[in-house]
Image (tube, rainbow, N blue to C red):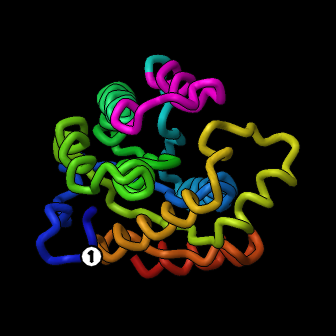
Amino acid sequence: MLSESSNSSIQPTKSHNYPGMFITLEGGEGSGKTSAIAHIERYYQEQGIPVVLTREPGGIEIAEKIRELILDRNHTVMDGRTEALLYAAARRQHLVEKVIPALQQGSTVICDRFIDSSLAYQGYARGLGMDAVWSINQFAIDGVMPDITFYLDIEPEMGLARIHANGDREINRLDLEQISFHHLVREGYNIVTAAYPDRIHKVDASVSIAEVAAQITRILAAL
Protein backbone atom coordinates (compact mmCIF):
# COMPACT_ATOMS: atom_id res chain seq x y z
CA MET A 1 0.00 0.00 0.00
CA LEU A 2 1.25 3.49 -0.78
CA SER A 3 2.89 5.46 2.00
CA GLU A 4 4.12 9.01 2.31
CA SER A 5 7.22 8.32 0.23
CA SER A 6 8.87 10.35 -2.47
CA ASN A 7 8.29 7.42 -4.84
CA SER A 8 4.56 8.01 -4.87
CA SER A 9 3.07 8.75 -8.26
CA ILE A 10 0.52 10.93 -6.48
CA GLN A 11 2.17 14.25 -7.05
CA PRO A 12 0.77 17.78 -7.26
CA THR A 13 -0.35 18.72 -10.76
CA LYS A 14 -1.74 21.86 -12.33
CA SER A 15 -5.39 22.55 -11.51
CA HIS A 16 -7.06 23.68 -14.75
CA ASN A 17 -6.99 26.45 -17.34
CA TYR A 18 -10.51 27.82 -16.84
CA PRO A 19 -11.32 31.30 -15.45
CA GLY A 20 -13.45 30.03 -12.56
CA MET A 21 -12.30 28.79 -9.15
CA PHE A 22 -12.68 25.10 -8.25
CA ILE A 23 -13.02 24.48 -4.50
CA THR A 24 -13.57 21.05 -2.93
CA LEU A 25 -14.49 19.96 0.59
CA GLU A 26 -13.20 16.69 2.02
CA GLY A 27 -13.59 14.84 5.29
CA GLY A 28 -14.81 11.72 7.00
CA GLU A 29 -18.43 10.96 7.79
CA GLY A 30 -20.04 13.66 9.94
CA SER A 31 -17.22 16.16 9.52
CA GLY A 32 -19.60 19.04 8.77
CA LYS A 33 -18.93 19.64 5.09
CA THR A 34 -22.49 20.83 4.41
CA SER A 35 -22.22 23.70 6.90
CA ALA A 36 -18.74 24.61 5.64
CA ILE A 37 -19.95 24.69 2.04
CA ALA A 38 -22.78 27.05 2.99
CA HIS A 39 -20.26 29.39 4.63
CA ILE A 40 -17.94 29.41 1.61
CA GLU A 41 -20.93 30.07 -0.65
CA ARG A 42 -21.86 33.15 1.40
CA TYR A 43 -18.23 34.32 1.38
CA TYR A 44 -18.12 34.49 -2.41
CA GLN A 45 -21.67 35.70 -2.89
CA GLU A 46 -20.91 38.71 -0.69
CA GLN A 47 -18.16 39.57 -3.18
CA GLY A 48 -20.58 39.30 -6.09
CA ILE A 49 -18.93 36.17 -7.46
CA PRO A 50 -21.28 33.59 -9.04
CA VAL A 51 -21.24 30.29 -7.17
CA VAL A 52 -22.24 26.76 -8.25
CA LEU A 53 -22.76 24.16 -5.52
CA THR A 54 -22.51 20.47 -6.33
CA ARG A 55 -21.52 17.12 -4.85
CA GLU A 56 -19.87 13.80 -5.57
CA PRO A 57 -20.97 11.32 -6.46
CA GLY A 58 -23.89 13.14 -8.01
CA GLY A 59 -24.58 16.66 -9.13
CA ILE A 60 -26.16 15.61 -12.41
CA GLU A 61 -28.69 12.91 -13.35
CA ILE A 62 -26.30 10.18 -14.50
CA ALA A 63 -23.96 10.63 -11.55
CA GLU A 64 -26.88 10.69 -9.09
CA LYS A 65 -27.99 7.30 -10.42
CA ILE A 66 -24.48 5.96 -9.89
CA ARG A 67 -24.58 7.42 -6.37
CA GLU A 68 -27.68 5.38 -5.63
CA LEU A 69 -25.85 2.22 -6.65
CA ILE A 70 -22.77 2.99 -4.57
CA LEU A 71 -24.47 4.06 -1.35
CA ASP A 72 -27.37 1.59 -1.35
CA ARG A 73 -27.28 -0.18 2.03
CA ASN A 74 -28.29 -3.42 0.33
CA HIS A 75 -25.13 -3.46 -1.82
CA THR A 76 -22.80 -4.75 0.88
CA VAL A 77 -21.25 -7.31 -1.50
CA MET A 78 -19.90 -4.59 -3.81
CA ASP A 79 -16.26 -5.24 -4.66
CA GLY A 80 -13.77 -2.49 -3.79
CA ARG A 81 -12.60 -2.12 -7.38
CA THR A 82 -16.17 -1.90 -8.60
CA GLU A 83 -16.77 0.85 -6.07
CA ALA A 84 -13.67 2.77 -7.17
CA LEU A 85 -14.58 2.50 -10.85
CA LEU A 86 -18.13 3.67 -10.22
CA TYR A 87 -16.86 6.73 -8.36
CA ALA A 88 -14.48 7.52 -11.24
CA ALA A 89 -17.27 7.12 -13.81
CA ALA A 90 -19.60 9.43 -11.87
CA ARG A 91 -16.73 11.92 -11.47
CA ARG A 92 -16.06 12.04 -15.21
CA GLN A 93 -19.67 12.69 -16.20
CA HIS A 94 -20.07 15.27 -13.45
CA LEU A 95 -16.97 17.14 -14.62
CA VAL A 96 -17.87 17.35 -18.29
CA GLU A 97 -21.55 18.08 -17.73
CA LYS A 98 -21.47 20.50 -14.80
CA VAL A 99 -18.11 21.46 -13.29
CA ILE A 100 -16.12 22.37 -16.41
CA PRO A 101 -18.95 24.39 -18.04
CA ALA A 102 -19.33 26.40 -14.81
CA LEU A 103 -15.58 27.03 -14.59
CA GLN A 104 -15.55 28.11 -18.22
CA GLN A 105 -18.19 30.71 -17.39
CA GLY A 106 -16.06 32.09 -14.55
CA SER A 107 -18.14 30.72 -11.67
CA THR A 108 -16.70 29.48 -8.40
CA VAL A 109 -17.58 25.79 -8.13
CA ILE A 110 -17.84 24.42 -4.59
CA CYS A 111 -17.96 20.63 -4.60
CA ASP A 112 -18.67 18.23 -1.74
CA ARG A 113 -15.88 15.63 -2.32
CA PHE A 114 -13.63 14.95 -5.29
CA ILE A 115 -10.62 12.77 -6.14
CA ASP A 116 -9.13 12.96 -2.62
CA SER A 117 -12.10 10.98 -1.30
CA SER A 118 -11.32 8.13 -3.67
CA LEU A 119 -7.68 8.11 -2.59
CA ALA A 120 -8.57 8.03 1.11
CA TYR A 121 -11.59 5.69 0.99
CA GLN A 122 -10.86 3.26 -1.83
CA GLY A 123 -7.11 3.70 -2.24
CA TYR A 124 -6.14 3.55 1.43
CA ALA A 125 -9.04 2.32 3.57
CA ARG A 126 -10.16 -0.34 1.06
CA GLY A 127 -6.54 -1.31 0.46
CA LEU A 128 -6.67 -0.96 -3.33
CA GLY A 129 -3.55 1.20 -3.33
CA MET A 130 -3.49 4.94 -3.78
CA ASP A 131 -1.42 4.73 -6.94
CA ALA A 132 -3.96 2.43 -8.60
CA VAL A 133 -6.90 4.64 -7.64
CA TRP A 134 -4.98 7.75 -8.69
CA SER A 135 -4.36 6.17 -12.09
CA ILE A 136 -7.98 5.39 -12.93
CA ASN A 137 -9.02 8.83 -11.73
CA GLN A 138 -6.43 10.57 -13.88
CA PHE A 139 -8.14 8.95 -16.85
CA ALA A 140 -11.46 10.28 -15.54
CA ILE A 141 -10.49 13.87 -14.69
CA ASP A 142 -8.00 14.43 -17.54
CA GLY A 143 -5.84 16.80 -15.48
CA VAL A 144 -8.63 18.89 -13.93
CA MET A 145 -7.81 19.38 -10.24
CA PRO A 146 -9.20 21.70 -7.56
CA ASP A 147 -7.59 25.07 -6.88
CA ILE A 148 -8.33 24.85 -3.14
CA THR A 149 -9.35 21.90 -0.97
CA PHE A 150 -10.51 22.11 2.63
CA TYR A 151 -10.03 18.91 4.61
CA LEU A 152 -12.30 18.88 7.65
CA ASP A 153 -10.47 16.71 10.15
CA ILE A 154 -12.38 15.01 12.97
CA GLU A 155 -12.13 11.90 15.12
CA PRO A 156 -14.31 9.22 13.48
CA GLU A 157 -16.17 8.53 16.71
CA MET A 158 -17.24 12.16 16.97
CA GLY A 159 -18.25 12.36 13.32
CA LEU A 160 -20.36 9.21 13.45
CA ALA A 161 -22.00 10.39 16.69
CA ARG A 162 -23.04 13.57 14.87
CA ILE A 163 -24.61 11.50 12.09
CA HIS A 164 -26.64 9.35 14.45
CA ALA A 165 -27.77 12.44 16.39
CA ASN A 166 -29.05 14.03 13.18
CA GLY A 167 -32.39 12.43 12.41
CA ASP A 168 -32.60 14.17 9.03
CA ARG A 169 -29.33 12.77 7.74
CA GLU A 170 -29.46 9.67 5.52
CA ILE A 171 -27.53 6.65 6.83
CA ASN A 172 -25.75 5.15 3.82
CA ARG A 173 -23.60 2.07 3.21
CA LEU A 174 -20.34 3.79 4.16
CA ASP A 175 -21.77 4.93 7.50
CA LEU A 176 -22.27 1.27 8.41
CA GLU A 177 -18.58 0.34 8.08
CA GLN A 178 -16.62 -0.73 11.15
CA ILE A 179 -14.95 2.08 13.13
CA SER A 180 -11.57 0.70 12.06
CA PHE A 181 -12.46 1.54 8.44
CA HIS A 182 -13.19 5.16 9.34
CA HIS A 183 -9.86 5.42 11.16
CA LEU A 184 -8.14 4.17 8.01
CA VAL A 185 -9.99 6.83 5.99
CA ARG A 186 -8.60 9.49 8.31
CA GLU A 187 -5.08 8.08 7.93
CA GLY A 188 -5.54 8.13 4.16
CA TYR A 189 -6.62 11.76 4.21
CA ASN A 190 -3.53 12.68 6.22
CA ILE A 191 -1.33 11.05 3.56
CA VAL A 192 -3.11 12.89 0.76
CA THR A 193 -2.90 16.17 2.68
CA ALA A 194 0.87 15.70 3.01
CA ALA A 195 1.12 15.08 -0.75
CA TYR A 196 -0.68 18.35 -1.58
CA PRO A 197 0.44 20.88 1.06
CA ASP A 198 -0.15 23.87 -1.24
CA ARG A 199 -3.68 22.85 -2.23
CA ILE A 200 -5.16 21.09 0.79
CA HIS A 201 -5.84 23.09 3.95
CA LYS A 202 -6.62 21.12 7.10
CA VAL A 203 -9.43 22.47 9.27
CA ASP A 204 -10.19 21.32 12.81
CA ALA A 205 -13.78 20.13 12.45
CA SER A 206 -14.21 19.06 16.08
CA VAL A 207 -15.10 22.62 17.13
CA SER A 208 -18.33 24.58 16.65
CA ILE A 209 -19.74 25.53 13.25
CA ALA A 210 -18.82 29.16 13.89
CA GLU A 211 -15.22 28.25 14.73
CA VAL A 212 -14.93 26.07 11.61
CA ALA A 213 -16.26 28.97 9.54
CA ALA A 214 -13.70 31.31 11.11
CA GLN A 215 -10.85 28.94 10.20
CA ILE A 216 -12.05 28.76 6.60
CA THR A 217 -12.45 32.53 6.34
CA ARG A 218 -8.87 33.06 7.54
CA ILE A 219 -7.57 30.64 4.90
CA LEU A 220 -9.60 32.21 2.09
CA ALA A 221 -8.55 35.70 3.11
CA ALA A 222 -4.89 34.68 3.13
CA LEU A 223 -5.21 33.14 -0.31
Q: Nearer the viewer, residue 210 or 72?
A: 72
- Residue appearing at x 48%, y 52% in the figure: 49
Residue 61 among those drawn in magenta: no
The tally of labels here is 1
Residue assigned mark 1 = 4
- Per the picture, the main secondary structure of the magenta-coloured stretch is helix
Residue 155 lies in what quarter of the image? bottom right
Q: Is residue 222 left or right of residue 9?
A: right
Q: Is residue 35 above or below residue 215?
A: above
State the extent of the magenta-drawn residues as a range. 63-84
Residue 21 seen anywhere in this rendered image of the structure: no
Q: Residue furthest front?
A: 77
Residue at 30% in and 36% down: 100
The answer to whether 130 appears left or right of 62 in the picture is left
Label 1, secondary structure: give it: loop
Quadrant in which the C terminus appears: bottom left
Residue in the picture at 48% in, 66% down: 150
Q: Position of residue 143 (x, y in %)?
A: 17, 47
The residue that appears at 57% across and 74% down in the rendered structure is 217
Q: Is residue 116 visible?
A: yes
Locate the N terminus and report the quarter of the image it occupies: bottom left
Rendered location of residue 21, percent (x, y): 36, 54
Give the x, y percent position of residue 83: 41, 34
Quarter of image, res 102:
top left
Number of residues whose C-alpha sits closer than 10 Å to that of mark 1, classed few (under 14), some (14–19) or many (20 or more)? few
**Residue 148 picture location, percent across and down:** 38, 63
